[in-house]
Amino acid sequence: MRTSQLSPSAATPSGDRPSGAPAAGDRRTGRERLRRIRSRLGAYVALTKPRIIELLLVTTVPTMILAQRGLPPFGLVLATLVGGAASAGAANTLNCVIDRDIDQLMNRTRKRPMATGEISPRAGLIFGLVLGAISLLWFALLVNVVAAALSLAAILLYVVGYTMLLKRRTPQNIVWGGIAGCMPVLIGWSAVTGSLAWAPVALFLVIFFWTPPHYWPLSMKFRRDYEAAGVPMLPVVAGPVRVAWEMVAYTVAMIAASLALVPLAGMTWAYAVIASLLGLWFGAGTLALLRRARHPRPGVRLGEMRLFHHSITYLSLLFLAVAIDPFLPL
């Protein structure tokens, strides 16, 4: 007697699925789970403020090249950048934990993961502390103890000095709190040499004096946000003319510090010319803002965000000149 052969489709009842084949609902569930994981990872990354870290690292590599008077070992550069990113990320995360109440009140920051509740304060605190501990251990084992100590100082200055003590109490908060943002040049130099010298101190001062004319334009733009949050940034408690005058003064000091690097680090005339031209260009921008603040005209804006973006361009180009200078046969 013949035995009829059934095809798989005939043997499987309509609406059923072969054994081992994922159902459409299972696939949707898997995609949704993956989406949630990606969203949560993205939230933790956002806590570290990657754009700020990027700017900090821009100053580290040129400083290492200057300290080496050439290209440092690639492994050392990579270890320093990874450690620096972890250290800055830890400080920024702890800043988000502490300032979550302020961030909820400001339009610019109200979508941060800690402000929205996507990440709990406890989870953020643990993440920041663990990331900070990893960065210190990383520096101590793969770079040197001096770099690890400077990294610890940077974290404490930003979290305790700026976030906890200064930010809500004084209009000079960003001036002294900005010291933490100056530390990467000291870390980069010590990573190569194991010590410090006057040359990285000059670079430290460049960033120190650069910070107010970089950050205050942003504070001017979002003055109402800071006022609503009760943060006494200088543009909140002082008029635009005074703020502009102080930015001009800090810019002059910044240019002087950039030129002090010439004798301290034996820079070439090419760097001296570039630093001078960049300083004049950025200084002209601060003077233009001062002029518009002193003589306001209807429909004419101060141009504070233009100056903010120009400050980033200035620092990036100046440190590019620092990185190129050791290779010039001059």
Image (cartoon, rainbow, N blue to C red):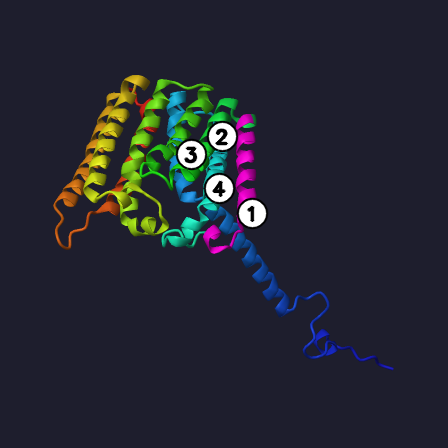
Residue 101 vertical placement versus 203 (above, below): below
Q: Do callouts 3 and 1 mark residues in contact (Cβ within 8 Å)?
A: no
Instruction: Give the mark, 3 or 1, whose residue is nearer the N terminus.
Output: 1
> Residue 49 location in percent, x, y?
43, 44
Residue 152 tag number: 2
Which image quadrant: the N terminus?
Answer: bottom right
Q: Give amino acid for label 2.
A: Leu
* Mark 4 burial class by Cα count in 10 Å: few <14, some 14-19, many 20+: many
Residue that mark 4 sits on: 94
Q: Give amino acid for label 3.
A: Gly
The Cα atoms of the two marked residues, 2 and 1, are separated by: 22 Å
Q: Nearer the viewer, mark 2 or mark 1?
A: 1
Q: Give amino acid for label 4.
A: Leu
Badge 3 marks a residue whose secondary structure is helix
Give, as a single range, the part of the protein colored magenta. Answer: 113-140
The Cα atoms of the two marked residues, 4 and 1, are separated by: 11 Å
Q: Residue at x 46, y 45 (%)?
A: 96
Badge 4 marks a residue whose secondary structure is helix
